[in-house]
């Protein structure tokens, strides 16, 4: 391929920012500039495997653009964990850059396909079961997208979106609440709590200890003071800290000190790590009410302590039971 043509194609696909006068490359040229998976997904409407794609669990701030044209499509500020294994968003960053059409390729399940306006790239599908105000879930293929980190927006030609990621630039991000809870192996806790209405994002990790940057190998010995914990980001317009705590007290045994099922040690203790005075007040209220209800035969021993630094666990622990259905858990929801 002539070097000038090669440069032009790259600028229009995976290197440059948005192209105002975009002209879609020929099919032969797309096959040369896109990976096989990118080509199959964007041009042939294929679907990449869940949980084995680039962005399903990406939590970095930034925007997602069409891998072919560079059209701005979605923002990390509207991304959430849908539990499907594909990157999901509550709404587009630029609605004008998307088009929808009926997809009847599955006769038993009609869907709405989403394509980019300029490039006509197959992106994924949109469903009516999302958590946002619009109730939409834009379920996209990572192979159709290119991610631009927030700190690269200016240099990549997307400077108009940089303000979204500066302090005060996005009210939604500031409005999300955070809950940090411990109650045994974090795999089972995350699997239950991530499904609660209003929960936007979850991650598992270690908190409440004295060792900096602990690993699982450190924590599992029970000598670092950390608890296996889950950090929950939730939308206060959809749920509340109190509602999350009431589920928390139903999904683990809060009467066993430093133990949950067969898991024994301080790393498996029951604890609520409050982030402010209001959370402390709510935690004490809910704990007292659960204790007084006698739904548990023994006294509640759940600790209520100040939140400290949360260290994210290794990648293989994140969303473990989504990636390994039927894996170990000692958690279930009690009536």
Image (tube, helix red, strand yellow):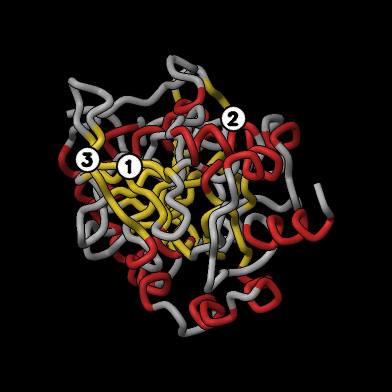
User: Looking at the picture, how far across and down is residue 93, in whole percent?
Assistant: 40, 67
- Labels 3 and 2 touching (C-beta < 8 A): no
Q: How far apart are marks 3 and 2 (CA)?
A: 54 Å
Give the image quarter of residue 47.
top left
Query: At numbered mark 2, what does the secondary structure look like: helix, strand or loop?
Result: loop
Element type where label 3 sits in the image:
strand
Name the quadrant containing residue 274.
bottom left
- The location of residue 89, given as percent across then percent down, is 38, 53
Q: Position of residue 252 (x, y in %)?
A: 35, 32
Tell me the residue at 25%/52% (across/down): 136
Circle 1 packing at 10 Å, graded few (<14), some (14-19), many (20+), is: many
Q: Quadrant of the C terminus?
A: top left
Residue that carries the numbered disc 2 in the rendered image: 265
CA neighbours of label 3 inside 10 A, class few (<14), some (14 to 19), many (20+): few
User: In the image, 77: left or right of 284?
Assistant: right
Residue under pointer 1: 125
- Above or below: residue 181 compared with residue 305: above
| Front position in the image: 78 or 188 | 78
Marks 1/3: CA–CA distance:
10 Å
Of pointers 1 and 3, the one earlier in the residue sequence: 3
Q: Mark 3 points at which residue?
A: 102
- Estimate how packed mark 2 is, as few (under 14), some (14 to 19) or many (20 or more) residues with alpha carbons within 10 Å: some
Residue 29, visible in the rendered structure? yes
Please give left or right for residue 228 compared with residue 75 in the image. Answer: right
Nearer mark to the viewer, of 2 and 1: 1
Instruction: State how far apart marks 2 and 1 are (Cα).
Output: 45 Å
Is residue 302 visible from the viewing direction of this image?
no
N-terminal of the pair, mark 2 or mark 1, is 1
Q: Residue furthest right?
A: 3
Q: Say which residue appears at 44% left-offset and 65% top-offset.
A: 77
């Amino acid at each position: 391929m002539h070097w000038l043509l090669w440069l032009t194609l790259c600028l229009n696909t995976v290197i440059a920012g948005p192209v105002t006068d975009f002209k879609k490359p020929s099919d032969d040229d797309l096959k040369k500039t896109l990976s096989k998976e990118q080509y199959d997904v964007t041009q042939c409407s294929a679907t990449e495997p869940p949980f084995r794609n680039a962005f399903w669990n990406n939590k970095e701030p930034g925007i997602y653009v069409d891998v072919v044209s560079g059209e701005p499509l979605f923002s990390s500020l509207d991304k959430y964990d849908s539990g499907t294994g594909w990157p999901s968003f509550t709404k587009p960053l630029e609605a004008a850059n998307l088009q929808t059409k009926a997809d009847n390729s599955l006769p038993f399940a009609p869907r709405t396909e989403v394509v980019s306006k300029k490039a006509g790239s197959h992106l994924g599908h949109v469903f009516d079961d999302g958590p946002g105000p619009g109730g939409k879930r834009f379920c996209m293929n990572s192979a159709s997208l290119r991610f631009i980190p927030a700190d690269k927006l200016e240099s990549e030609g997307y400077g108009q979106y940089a303000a979204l990621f500066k302090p005060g630039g996005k009210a939604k991000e500031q409005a999300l609440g955070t809950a940090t809870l411990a109650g045994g192996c974090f795999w089972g806790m995350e699997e239950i709590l991530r499904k609660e209405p209003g929960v936007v994002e979850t991650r598992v990790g270690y908190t409440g200890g004295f060792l900096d940057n602990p690993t699982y190998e450190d924590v599992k010995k029970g000598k670092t003071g950390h608890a296996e914990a889950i950090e929950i980001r939730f939308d206060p317009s959809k749920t509340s800290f109190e509602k999350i705590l009431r589920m928390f007290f139903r999904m683990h045994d809060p009467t066993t000190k430093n133990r949950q099922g067969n898991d024994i040690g301080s790393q498996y203790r029951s604890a609520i790590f409050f982030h402010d005075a209001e959370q402390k007040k709510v935690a004490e209220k809910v704990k007292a009410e659960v204790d007084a209800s006698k739904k548990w035969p023994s006294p509640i021993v759940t600790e209520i302590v100040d939140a400290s630094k949360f260290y994210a666990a290794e990648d293989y622990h994140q969303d473990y039971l989504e990636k390994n259905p039927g894996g170990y858990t000692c958690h279930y929801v009690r009536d």
